Amino acid sequence: MDQKSWEEVRKAIEDEEQERLFYYNDEEWWVSRLYGEEKSFLLTRGKDSHTQRFDTAQELFNKGIVDGKPFIERIKDFY
């Protein structure tokens, strides 16, 4: 994913509370929210529904783990 696309996605997740689907190595990853809970950013691996929960989008971006690395470091590899 290029920088411009990432900024659009970041805004959709952080400001507009949208769910987003990403692919990394042909594997689905979802970013979503729990309805009715402001402080709930979820990062879920599709194949086994393993879910990581964070209080803020920034925490998800920095502490969410995708294939052993922080989410923010995998952005360039998402499609």
Image (spheres, grey):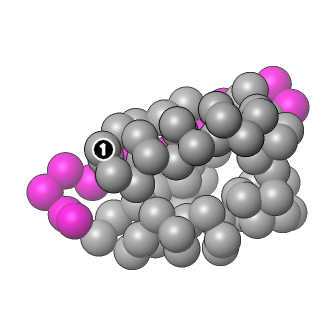
Residue range (magenta): 25-38
Most distant residue in the left direction: 36
Residue at 76%, 33% in the rendered image:
1
Q: How many marks?
A: 1
Image x and y of residue 14, in percent: 40, 54
Image x and y of residue 53, in percent: 47, 67
21 vs 65, left or right, is: left
Asked which quadrant contains residue 46, the reply is: top right
Q: Is residue 24 magenta?
A: no
Q: Is residue 72 above or below residue 79?
A: below
Q: Is residue 20 above or below residue 59?
A: above
- Mark yes or no: residue 36 visible: yes
Image x and y of residue 73, in percent: 81, 58
- The quarter in which the C terminus is drawn is top right
Residue at 66%, 71% in the rendered image:
62
As helix, strand or loop, the secondary structure at mark 1 comes to loop
Residue at 35%, 39% in the rendered image:
18
Mark 1 burial class by Cα count in 10 Å: few <14, some 14-19, many 20+: few
Q: Is residue 76 above or below residue 79?
A: below
Residue at 71%, 58% in the rendered image:
71
Asked which quadrant contains residue 4, the reply is: top right
- Mark yes or no: residue 78 visible: no
Label 1 sits on what residue type?
Glu
User: Which residue does the numbered mark 1 point to in the structure image?
Assistant: 16
